Image (cartoon, coloured by chain):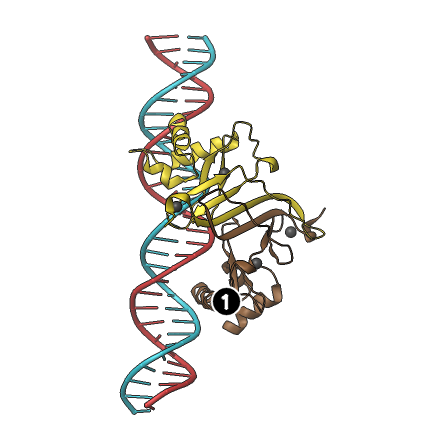
Chain colours: A brown, B yellow, C cyan, D red
Amino acid sequence: MRELVYGVLDKNRKALSLYEIEQQFDNVDRSTIFRTLKTFQDNLLIHSVDDGSGAVKYALCDDDCTCSLDDLHYHFLCTKCGQTHCLKNIPIPAVDLPEGFNFENANFVIKGTCPNCQG
Amino acid sequence: MRELVYGVLDKNRKALSLYEIEQQFDNVDRSTIFRTLKTFQDNLLIHSVDDGSGAVKYALCDDDCTCSLDDLHYHFLCTKCGQTHCLKNIPIPAVDLPEGFNFENANFVIKGTCPNCQG
DNA sequence: AATTACGTGCAACAGTATTGCAAAGTTATC
DNA sequence: GATAACTTTGCAATACTGTTGCACGTAATT
Ligand SMILES: [Mn+2]
Ligand SMILES: [Mn+2]
Ligand SMILES: [Zn+2]
Ligand SMILES: [Zn+2]
């Protein structure tokens, strides 16, 4: 199962929801995939994004990813096709927080239309 | 009801979830508040944030807000107290998207500890 | 072989968001 | 003031995602 789920993420090269992954199999239970994803996440193979679409999505990390601040990147949710892409090549600017606020983590989601969905 | 819900948002000056708003009343149904918030949102009185906490939160807009790109701002979720603040005074940097991606909207959530929760 | 550990499916449950419907309340019209 | 039209509210039901308990089968370990 782990190899199969990993394969799905590897093949798609974008962030997929639990449901979307489930769709790619015929007879695998949600909970099995859920637990597989959890294992992946515990071992820093994948990261998850809450893009506001209602379902958390999962995507492969880069080889050298430690899922720490250094690996922060934007995510892009297409409002037409609903696909979510990792924008790993765009630098995340430092945010100048007001006094007293302490930066730990961030979730930056950009919405718009993706290359596949341009009129 | 509208005046009361507006009052709660006005008094708290931070983003509140439906449940948190519900808590501030004795005998008001969730759905009533839900529909009130929807009305507010349709009329650009409030905006909503999905900060990844599991519940969408709502906060008052500024007087001149049109909930468009110009009114985009960061939101800060405190990982200790769970409170969500609008950081309206920090500029959102322009993002240099790859070819073919079209910026429409964004949701930038920063997580960390808020001034109330510093050790 | 017996024991242990692990993976899987099923079913149940939790939390949030959302809607249909009828009752209650309000406003407009005569 | 009575009636009708419209709006707001509460209740209950539902949808959807995420999560967990438990039983069972399979593989590894002794
Ligand atoms: Mn990503
Ligand atoms: Mn805000
Ligand atoms: Zn698209
Ligand atoms: Zn705090």
Label 1 crowding class (10 Å Cα cut-off): few <14, some 14-19, many 20+? some
Q: Position of residue B17 (x, y in %)?
A: 41, 41
Q: Nearer the viewer, residue A64 or D11?
A: A64
Name the residue that disc number 1 marks: A44
Whether residue A57 is situated above or below residue C15 in the rendered picture: below
* Mark 1 element type: loop
Residue at image location 44% in from the left, 44% down from the top:
A100
Residue at image location 37% in from the left, 41% down from the top:
B19
Residue at image location 57% in from the left, 65% down from the top:
A9
Q: Position of residue A6 (x, y in %)?
A: 54, 69
Q: Nearer the viewer, residue A98 or B9?
A: A98
Q: Would you identify the image quadrant in which residue A72 lies?
A: bottom right
Chain ID at mark 1? A
Can you see residue A79? no
Q: Would you identify the image quadrant in which residue B94 lies?
A: top right
Can you see residue B22? yes
Q: How many marks?
A: 1
Q: Position of residue B66 (x, y in %)?
A: 57, 31
Residue at image location 62% in from the left, 51% down from the top:
A81
Tell me which amino acid carries mark 1. Answer: Leu
Whether residue A36 is situated above or below residue B28 in the rendered picture: below
